[in-house]
Image (cartoon, rainbow, N blue to C red):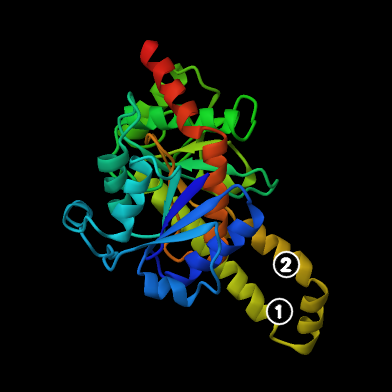
Amino acid sequence: MKIVIDAMGGDHAPKAHVAGALAAVRSFKDVDVVLVGDEREIEKHLPKATSQISVIHTDEKIEDDDVPTKAIRRKRDSSMVLAVREVKEGRADACISSGNTGALMTAGLLHVGRIQGIERPALAPMLPTIDGEGFLLLDVGANVDTKASHMVQNAFMGSAYMEMVKKVRQPRVGLVNVGTEDGKGNELSKETFQLLQEAPLHFIGNVEARDLLNGVCDVAVCDGFSGNLVLKSIEGTASTLFTLLKKELTSSFTNKIAAGLLRSSFMNVKEKMSYSHYGGAGLFGLKAPVIKAHGSSDHTAVYHAIRQAKQMVSENVTGIIEKEAEKQGEQ
């Protein structure tokens, strides 16, 4: 299995990507990693040659403030475009990038292409829950302007993924809304609610964002604008909570002793809440696995993104979604 990484995307490129790749090939003997980017910069962090890691050199990269469509067309030799092209041309099984989200979405659509029957791909990360099972949230920003039909397709894709890959029997699908009562929300929410009620899914109705981490549903459906707000709020809250906790636990000698005794417990909680241990957001609906990792991904996040890509390939997620799209097209 070969996984290609845009090694120049993100805040900590390429150091984090090299370290994550090294950790991954130590853990997964059946995975080869291709790093695409400035070979000189990459080799600064690659201590020695390994048969499982190779490099494709390019001096060009897409910046976070580049306009996605223009960047993909003008920067054809950028690390992101070359990485996606490796998947398109069959030399790699999956692609990972921590770079410009809009550009990755555009590159995925132009080079990899949509699964027939899927109107719009969706960004779908797994997020933590108290019981440790996690839930799938989609869309989190691939489509800011969304139709009800797109959200229903997201529900089917998410439900199929949770059932076939995560082995959840009858995944509970919830619509993220401003209240749990029927009839809540704007016109888009109301229309989506009606369509989901009529769909052959285990739809449990509206759910509120505050209940998501409690495991209220297995698949949380929302438009890309709202989903991105939910995602960033969860990440920001977790980060702030641990910053406050660290400050409090080091504020006195007694607290430091208590912190030392409970260190392993705090680390377990931090690991469960950290985005870096959940990989990235899969672009569901494309013809091959493309994963958007967090822009601030460290080596741990890159490692888990590779683990996630490996699982998506092994479990044939693209094929599962394709079959689901075919089934819905026949109904």
Q: Considering the image in quadrants, where does the C terminus appear?
A: top left
Q: Is residue 205 visible?
A: no
Residue that numbered label 2 is attached to: 266
Q: Residue shown at 80%/85% (left/top)?
A: 254
Picture coordinates of residue 17, whole percent (x, y): 48, 64
Could you say where residue 39 lies in the image, as x and y percent from the top left? 38, 70
Residue type at mark 2: give it.
Phe
Mark toward the viewer: 1 or 2: 2
What residue appears at the point 45 percent right and 59 percent down from the top-left corner? Answer: 294
Residue 54, image x, y percentages: 46, 60
Report x, y in % for residue 40.
38, 75
In the image: residue 252, left or right of residue 58: right
Residue 330 seen by the camera: yes
Q: Would you place residue 62 above or below residue 171 in this image?
A: below
Give, as a three-letter code, the residue at label 1. Leu
Q: Which residue is mark 1?
A: 249
